[in-house]
Image: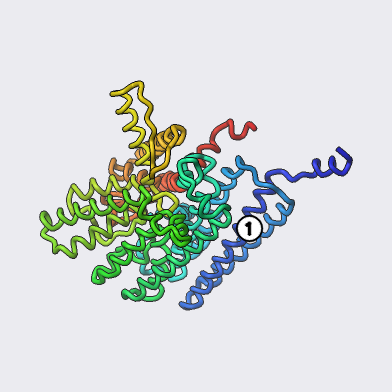
Amino acid sequence: MNMNQSYRVARAPSSRYLFYRVLGYLLVMLSGIMLIGCGVAVGFGEKGLWTFLACAVFTCSCGYFLVYKGRHQFRLKNRQLFLLTTLSWLIICLFGSLPLYWLIPNCTFTDAWFETVSALTTTGSTVFAGLEKLPKSVLFWRCIMNWVGGIGIIVMAIAILPALKIGGMKLFKTESSDISEKILPKSSTMSASIGLVYLVLSAVTMLGYYLAGMNGFDAITHGMTTVATGGFANYDSSFGQYKSMPLIFWISSLCMILAALPFVLFVSTVKGNRQALIKDPQVRAFLLIIGFCTALLTWQQVTHNNRELFDALTHSLFNVVSIITTCGYASEDYTLWGNLPIMLFFYLTFSGACSGSTSGGLKIFRIQLAALLLMKQVKLLIHPNAVWVQKYGGKKVNDELLGNVLAFCFIYFATIGAIALALSFYELDLVTALTGAATAVANVGPGLGNIIGPAGNFSTLPDGAKWWLSFGMLLGRLEILTILLLLSPSYWRY
């Protein structure tokens, strides 16, 4: 090694410069989105213009400072992705909460943080009442953060989660499925293609809402939160505001279903594989669950609640799709339908939709793989010496992937239990604590009960409970292990 090489090694940038630069770019992009909020404030003649402008300037200044601090060249290591991902979500939530904190009267930082985390994780839980009275720029900011969070999780799934062996994109990266290598060989190309699908689906949803009777502002904001499966609405009654427009419910149901399908399969379909969606086992199971639950609830409402068939079908489909896709819209208070719907919606809260989509939750494919493992164990009890080969979608699934899925399912429910226990320290009742924890980790939105049910919100919860729920939302959106890995001493040891 010569002197020049020794000098370069000595001057090699540390990992902190990497974080400075990436986080700086994220803040610069966030400041650009804040400028859109300025435009909305100007368009509606609101005073929020200067607040958004001040937030944009402050955020951009901090971003450029971090970019300057991290101006050295670097290469990203796999183990650093986990810390960088967590820091990215935290810093965006922090700066994203500033407009809410400064614009909404009597808004505490806890409420601003909770609302921002709920938006970016596409959970859809809210601590604000009287949404109709809030400035349009604030409503737009909540919804565009929802929309940004929706596309962010897809990109993260492609770049980060395969290394954890628990993310949805693992199905497209392992020997159990080689779909991604056949479609698009590079993650950057795949991200761009999926981003284009996201934009097109968003535009189509907005147009559909507008043609069905929504005003332009509502069509844009609800279009963003529908495709993001985030569930933020501009009214306290959520989609109950459009109860006299059943076409809107059908359009919303269809668009939520499309947003909850694997986006990579849309790309595959465009590339020529016309049966990519039809043949996918989790898509078939997802649609089957929707059909069964919708039929069951429609029957229950017609026979027990004497409801007209079309009306019962419309609201059953809409609310089933909203919960299973973790969107969290509500057309009405479905907890008044009876005990059967309450239990069914509670189960759907845990389910989630397809991997590789904007949906949260446990995901259909994990449930299917866990069922494969269960069937294998049953067969081994009958034939202990037999060798069984598990297949998913016609392809072999190795025992390592099944074990990883089982471990994730365990930590998923253990996390919900731990957060529910923490919430109980704030004297919350069993239904509120349990469903609050479940809806936070699953990123669904509404819970059950009189407080946080579809007819309520999270405004009356103690501040400590809101911080626990915010933590649960981040855990759920980052697939839990991404954050738990950082709590392991072995991560920092090497």
Residue located 45% across and 34% down the image:
398
Q: What amino acid does circle 1 point to?
A: Tyr
Number of marks:
1
Residue 362 visible from this viewpoint = no
Give percent across and percent down for residue 216: 40, 75
Report x, y in % for residue 364: 36, 46
Residue 287 relative to residue 471: left or right: left
Q: Does residue 11 appear in the picture of this structure? A: yes
Give coordinates of residue 260: x percent, y percent. Answer: 38, 55
Q: Which residue is mark 1?
A: 25
Judged left or right of residue 395, residue 12 is: right
- Residue 15 vs 261, above or below: the answer is above
**Which of the 4 quarters of the picture holds residue 221?**
bottom left
> Looking at the image, which residue is at 84% across and 40% down?
6
The residue drawn where x is 40% and y is 59% is 274
Which is more toward the observer, 18 or 103?
18
Q: Name the image quarter holding the N terminus.
A: top right
Residue at figure coordinates x 13%, y 61% from the top left: 307
